[in-house]
């Protein structure tokens, strides 16, 4: 079956603009996770969803970052007023249940000029 | 102390060698442990879960030492295709997420 998909694969934007990143998890996976990975760095947890609820938003770096999930499926990560330090690969993962094996999407590479 | 710590490497080994990585974790209540593999500019992929009794998958063996709070990954008969970054992943107990280590880079050479 289809894996986790993310769009766009690459996004170049100007400082101060808003961006939306999309994640389509594996069908039937109840848990969905967003991570950020800066060049040469490890994965940084941002937020996770159980169903459409986000019990843990502790990793969101600032109030410019928000995320939602609808229909226990698609999730959107929104970054408002982007800054250059937001440049990174944003990875989405899903799992059948919370803390089961996570399957990752290919990521969205965000570049803020 | 970081929740999950790994030696970043790189580990440079010749083909056919045996190599081992360790990873330490700080939360004694951690319950789930995994090794993921990440190729350059690719997403992480699950290599194997780590079970209390230790487990093996072909050339790969994972061990858990709860008393010392570390997990290990042993790769036997290294192949060029094993070159990647290996991420240690831990469910940090009461925290509601998996925590990824920063990874150990392995380079297998001819």
Image (cartoon, coloured by chain):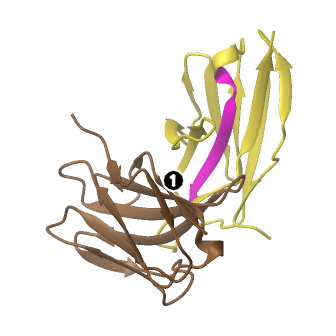
Chain colours: A brown, B yellow
- The answer to which of B79 and B62 lies nearer the viewer is B79
- The answer to which of B35 and B64 lies nearer the viewer is B35
Looking at the image, residue A55 lies above or below residue B84: below
Q: A9 left or right of A113?
A: left
**Residue A18 highlighted magenta (yes or no):** no
Quadrant where the N terminus of chain A sits is top left
Q: Magenta segment, which residues? A: B82-91
Looking at the image, residue B56 lies above or below residue B85: above
Residue drawn at x 72%, y 52% as measured from the top left = A40
Q: Residue furthest left?
A: A71
Q: Main secondary structure of the magenta part?
A: strand
Q: A22 left or right of B91?
A: left
Any part of residue B92 in sight: no
Residue drawn at x 19%, y 49% as measured from the top left = A27
**Residue B67 horizontal/vertical position (percent):** 73, 54
- The residue tagged 1 is B32
Any part of residue B95 in sight: yes
Residue drawn at x 30%, y 41% as measured from the top left = A3
Quadrant where the C terminus of chain A sits is bottom right
């Amino acid at each position: 079956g289809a894996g986790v998909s993310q769009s766009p694969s690459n996004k170049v934007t100007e400082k101060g603009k808003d961006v939306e990143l999309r994640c389509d998890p594996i069908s039937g996976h109840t848990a969905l996770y967003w991570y950020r990975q800066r060049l040469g760095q490890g994965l940084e947890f941002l937020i996770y969803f159980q169903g459409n609820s986000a019990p843990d938003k502790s990793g969101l770096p600032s109030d410019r970052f928000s995320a939602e999930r609808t229909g226990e499926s698609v999730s959107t990560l929104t970054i408002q007023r982007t800054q250059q330090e937001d440049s990174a690969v944003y990875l989405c993962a899903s799992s059948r249940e919370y803390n089961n094996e996570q399957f990752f999407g290919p990521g969205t590479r965000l570049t803020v000029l | 102390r970081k929740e999950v710590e790994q030696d970043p490497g790189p580990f440079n080994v010749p083909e056919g060698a045996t190599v081992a990585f360790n990873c330490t974790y700080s939360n004694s209540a951690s319950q789930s442990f995994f090794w993921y593999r990440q190729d350059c500019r690719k997403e992480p992929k699950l290599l194997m879960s780590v079970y209390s009794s230790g487990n093996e998958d072909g050339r790969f063996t994972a061990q858990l030492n709860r008393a010392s709070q570390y997990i290990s990954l042993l790769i036997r008969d290294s192949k060029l295709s094993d070159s990647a970054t290996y991420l240690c992943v831990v469910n940090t107990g009461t925290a509601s997420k998996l925590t990824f280590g920063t990874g150990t880079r392995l380079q297998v050479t001819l």
